[in-house]
Image (cartoon, rainbow, N blue to C red):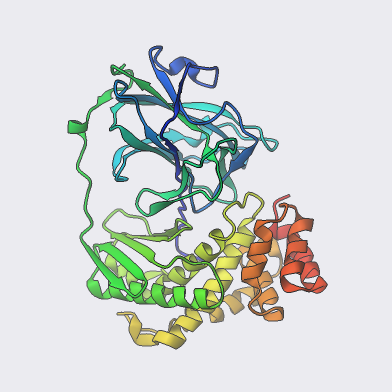
Amino acid sequence: MRTFVKTSATVCLVLATGAVLAGVGPTSGQDQIPKNAVRLTYVGDTAKDYRSLGASGHAVLFQRADKLPFVEAVQIFAARYGYPQPPAEDFHLYLLNDKFQILKDLTYPYGMIERTSESGDLRWYTLVTPSIEVPMRFYVALSFNPHQTKGIYLGLDKNVKQAHSFIGLPDSGFQPVKEPSDWMVRVYMSEQPSGTKGIQRPAERKPAQSVASSIQTGSVDVVYSGIGADYAAAIGKVTDAARDIYTSAGYNLPSRIRVRVECSPGKAVGLRTDGIGGIFLTLPGPEKLLRPSQSGTFNIYGLCHECGHMAMYRTLPSRPWMTTAFAEGWAHYIGSEVTDRVFARLGIAVWPDAYDYRADGTQRLKRQIAALKTPTENPVAAGAKFFMEIDAAYPNKIPQVFREMASATPTAEQLAAAVGRACRSPEAERLFVRHAAILVKH
């Protein structure tokens, strides 16, 4: 069983330079907005399109009017998906300045967003904030931490002449969307603070915390605190080798990867990617960097695993149809394979606590698959088994499989057809059909 806790975060930003100032319209929680607030928006009242971007995120940089300095509320056109019972957790609303520094981090319960029963069942929700004074240009960001079994769809307005929206995270940067569209986010501004939930002015904000050290290794930047430079360098070397292995095989990884390591008491063990170019590792103490037999964590495999997620997410940004068996099964298979290949390049000595980490790669994966009795017993191993079979039968075709899937209608039949086209084989299509029950949501 994998030790790392995945906490993939989704951030939505809306760039609304030249945004429209409009009157207040009916929506959930509308009566909580101060009566004198003015709505700043760049999108329409409704939209047919929506996205949940998994380990990545959505984005709109707002430019406020000169005499409207206070944010009073934010509205999102959204719907929750996944299990009927909402998860017992919050999502985050961030206000950022134009340098992506956090001005305010606010949390709201997942349960306030109603679960959609049918596609397109989205509505506006009001997120009331303190009266927060913001600069002329500021970002609104949302972190939904989505997974296969829970998440929040955010509306996407494609009826705009020019795209102003982005994808990314505050601590890993943003990329513009590829087509004219904007995320369905709007902000309510006031001239004077209402103070309904408190007031925050610039002088009251805590200065941004700086990270202790950084190191560059090939195509990887490692920013770290709480661990030694030897482990930071090893993390960079492993990630750099993994990135080169993926790109040499035709996968879409960025020219540079940013790895951020935070190690301090009270931190949970966690490893995730934003799906774009960032990997984030948290640890309660440096002892968690030791070999798995002593620490219980598979750090080398974990870095290769997250690069695998990135390779898929950058090609398949919209994945509401995808099960855990598909997403995690893929990363488990390819992460295991790449772990072996990293060992072939770097050997034992790359890790300060040197050990033969091939034991964490395909050796471990093959044992898990051999012990598999039913797919539901271990969906991740079952998903990895599919990818192992398709890769063995059709070498080097999985990058094209992902590209074909990105443009396919998200049904089991059409996704299977995409696999057949990518592999140029009817048998490849039939192989996907045989596994479709665990790979595609019903």
Residue 384 falls in image quadrant: bottom right
* Residue 304 in picture, x, y percent from top left: 47, 71
* Total marks placed: 0
Would you say 309 lies left or right of 286 here? right
Q: Nearer the viewer, residue 279 or 246?
A: 246
Residue farthest along the left direction in this orientation: 203
Of all residues shown, which one is farthest toward the front? 161
Q: Residue at x 21, y 35 (%)?
A: 205
The answer, for residue 288, to whether it is visible in the render is: no
Report x, y in % for residue 298: 43, 71
Position above or below: 174 against 195: below
Camera-side residue of 422 and 2: 422
In the depicted structure, whether residue 132 falls above or below residue 418: above
Q: Does 234 sit above or below residue 139? A: below
User: Is residue 427 rendered to the left or right of residue 262?
Assistant: right
Q: Which residue is drawn at the image coordinates 72% and 80% (left, top)?
A: 393
Residue located farthest toward the top when viewing the structure as drawn: 35
Residue 280 position by quadrant:
bottom left
Task: From the viewer's side, name the closer residue of 75 and 2.
Answer: 75
Q: Position of residue 272 (x, y in %)?
A: 44, 59
- Please report the residue visible at 28 percent of the width from the left and 60 percent of the height from the top: 263
Q: In which quadrant of the rendered view does residue 412 lie? A: bottom right
Left or right: 168 as drawn, with respect to 407: left
Query: Is residue 395 visible from the viewing direction of this image?
Result: yes
**At x 57% / y 76%, what residue is drawn?**
365
Q: Position of residue 132 (x, y in %)?
A: 30, 27
